[in-house]
Amino acid sequence: MQTSYRTKHETKKIHSRSNTAIPILLQLPMKRLVPFVLAAVLLSNSACHLFSKKKHPAPKESKTVAADVEKDFMVRWIDKRTSDLVATGKPPTAAHEQAVAEFKASYSYTNAASQAK
């Protein structure tokens, strides 16, 4: 029975695969291939909107936007001021009345001040 053990100096034979056909794209170095592929993907995706026929309409503006904003500001300001006055020890109804009076005095130039109750 003969066993063959390799010695230190023997090397394993490596078979060459150079006979197989490699596509041209795989022969390019990675430093050239990656930027080329990224550029191709970006150009193909970013140009899609150029051929779109859809026109996006402008958002519809409400004629009462300013009034709604002023009213929302008034409600928030009065609520905040009322809670501050209640925290100092005033009764809630008196605090609300004082907050409304302060809002009317401070913001008399707004339309919301004339509507404050």
Image (tube, rainbow, N blue to C red):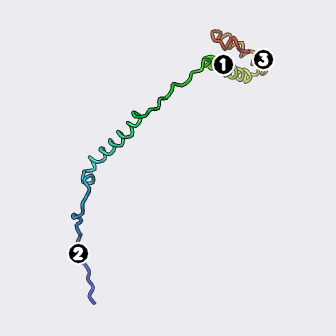
Give the residue drawn at x 63%, y 12%: 110
Comparing 70 with 36, the one in front is 36
Q: Which residue is mark 2?
A: 8
Give the amino acid type for the residue marked by disc 3 in the picture: Ala
Q: Which residue is mark 3?
A: 94
Image location (x, y in percent) of residue 3:
27, 85
Give the amino acid type for the residue marked by disc 2 in the picture: Lys
Q: Secondary structure at mark 1?
A: helix
Q: Is residue 79 above or below residue 14?
A: above
Q: Nearer the viewer, mark 3 or mark 1?
A: 1
Comparing 52 with 103, the one in front is 52
Q: Which residue is mark 1?
A: 71
Q: Quadrant of residue 105?
A: top right
Q: How would you rate the neighbour count of disc 3 (Cα within 10 Å): few for under 14, some for 14-19, many for 20 or more?
A: few
Whole-angstrom CA distance, mark 3 to mark 1, is 21 Å
Whole-angstrom CA distance, mark 1 to mark 2, is 91 Å
Q: Nearer the viewer, mark 1 or mark 2?
A: 1
Give the amino acid type for the residue marked by disc 1 in the picture: Lys
Q: How would you rate the neighbour count of disc 2 (Cα within 10 Å): few for under 14, some for 14-19, many for 20 or more?
A: few
